[in-house]
Image (spheres, helix red, strand yellow):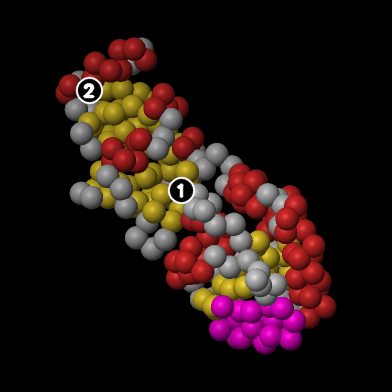
């Protein structure tokens, strides 16, 4: 016998918000809350194991946000319906609308919550959830690549990277805004994720973005880069000098 019970989990970093949503869902017939979680990592593990029908997902959370949770489950064989719980964030709401996801704004209106559950029951067979996830991630993170960091993850457009520099088992990514992000990958692993025609190896420990080169000093073996008014200089390994010849350096 197939159960008509809708399995749901709640993902929200605010304890009070999780409790209030849990209490509201208890009042809706046919809904069973099988878990309530404060963070993305714990929730992802449960989603993969429990395969809930609905995930009530907060958008703004410290560390990894709701969109990053979608990124982490998109390649697995799970397809929960996502109902976002969000404050009045115009960008988030526009992105969610664009991708055919449902959302409820805080404070939660019990009538709207019940309406979302009814919508799920009537439309669940007609929605391509995997396609929705891809559409949303493309909208939120256009042309960006995910990199894991010591505290979570960042998403960077390769065109914004000025240069990469190895730091033991990590890589420092310097971007055009002047920021530096340390990611949990070897230099070669970072480079593999990037467009190969855009980056040039200048030493055993560095790659540069060709778009930002301003000058090469062969005598001092220095390459100069400039991004948004800020100057950078990197030492060029002797055996790497010849690669500049094909760029007229």
Per the picture, the main secondary structure of the magenta-coloured stretch is: helix
Specify whether residue 136 is in view: no
Q: Which of 106 and 75 is in front in this view?
A: 75
In this rendering, the answer to whether 241 lies above or below 222 is: above
Q: Which residue is drawn at 77% across and 58% down?
A: 123
Q: Is the C-beta separation of discs 2 and 1 under 8 Å? A: no
In this rendering, the answer to whether 192 lies above or below 117 is: above
**Residue under label 1:** 146
What percent of the width, then of the height, locates residue 248? 36, 12
**Residue under label 2:** 240
Q: Which residue is drawn at 54% across and 65% down?
A: 51
Q: Residues within 10 Å of mark 1 (few under 14, many from 20)?
A: some
Q: Nearer the viewer, residue 244 or 91?
A: 91
Q: Residues within 10 Å of mark 2 (few under 14, many from 20)?
A: some
Distance Cα–Cα, label 2 vs label 1: 29 Å
- Relative side of 201 to 95, left or right: left
What percent of the width, then of the height, locates residue 23? 67, 87
Specify whether residue 75 is in view: yes
Q: Split into 4 quadrants, where in the image is the N terminus? A: bottom right
The first of marks 2 and 1 along the sequence is: 1
Q: Nearer the viewer, residue 20 or 128?
A: 128
Q: Give the range drawn in magenta.
A: 15-34
**Viewer-side label of 2, 1:** 1
Q: Split into 4 quadrants, where in the image is the C terminus? A: top left
**Secondary structure at numbered mark 1:** strand
Query: What is the residue that sits farthest to the front in this orientation?
Result: 1
**Secondary structure at numbered mark 2:** helix
Q: Which residue is drawn at 55% across and 57% down?
A: 78
Is residue 32 found inside the magenta-colored segment of the image?
yes
Is residue 107 found inside the magenta-colored segment of the image?
no
What percent of the width, then of the height, locates residue 31? 68, 78
- Relative side of 120 to 202, left or right: right
């Amino acid at each position: 016998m197939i159960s008509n019970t809708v399995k749901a989990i709640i993902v929200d970093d605010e304890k009070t918000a999780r409790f209030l949503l849990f209490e509201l869902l208890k009042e809706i017939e046919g809904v069973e809350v099988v878990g309530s979680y404060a963070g993305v990592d714990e929730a992802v593990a449960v989603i993969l194991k429990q395969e809930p029908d609905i995930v009530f997902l907060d958008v703004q959370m410290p560390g990894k946000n709701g969109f990053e949770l979608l990124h982490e489950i998109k390649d697995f064989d799970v397809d929960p319906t996502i109902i976002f719980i969000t404050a009045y964030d115009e960008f988030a709401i526009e992105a969610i609308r664009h991708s055919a996801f449902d959302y409820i704004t805080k404070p939660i209106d019990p009538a709207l919550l019940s309406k979302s559950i009814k919508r799920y029951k009537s439309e669940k067979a007609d929605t391509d959830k995997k396609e929705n996830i891809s559409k949303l991630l493309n909208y939120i993170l256009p042309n960006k690549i995910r990199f894991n960091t010591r505290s979570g993850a960042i998403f960077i457009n390769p065109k914004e990277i000025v240069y990469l520099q190895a730091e033991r088992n990590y890589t420092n990514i310097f971007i055009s805004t002047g920021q530096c992000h340390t990611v949990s990958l070897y230099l070669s692993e970072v480079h593999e994720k990037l467009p190969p025609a855009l980056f040039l190896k200048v030493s055993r420990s560095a790659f540069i973005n060709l778009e930002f080169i301003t000058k090469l000093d062969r005598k001092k073996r220095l390459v100069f880069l400039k991004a948004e008014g800020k100057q950078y200089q990197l030492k060029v390994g002797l055996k790497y000098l010849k690669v500049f010849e094909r760029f007229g350096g």
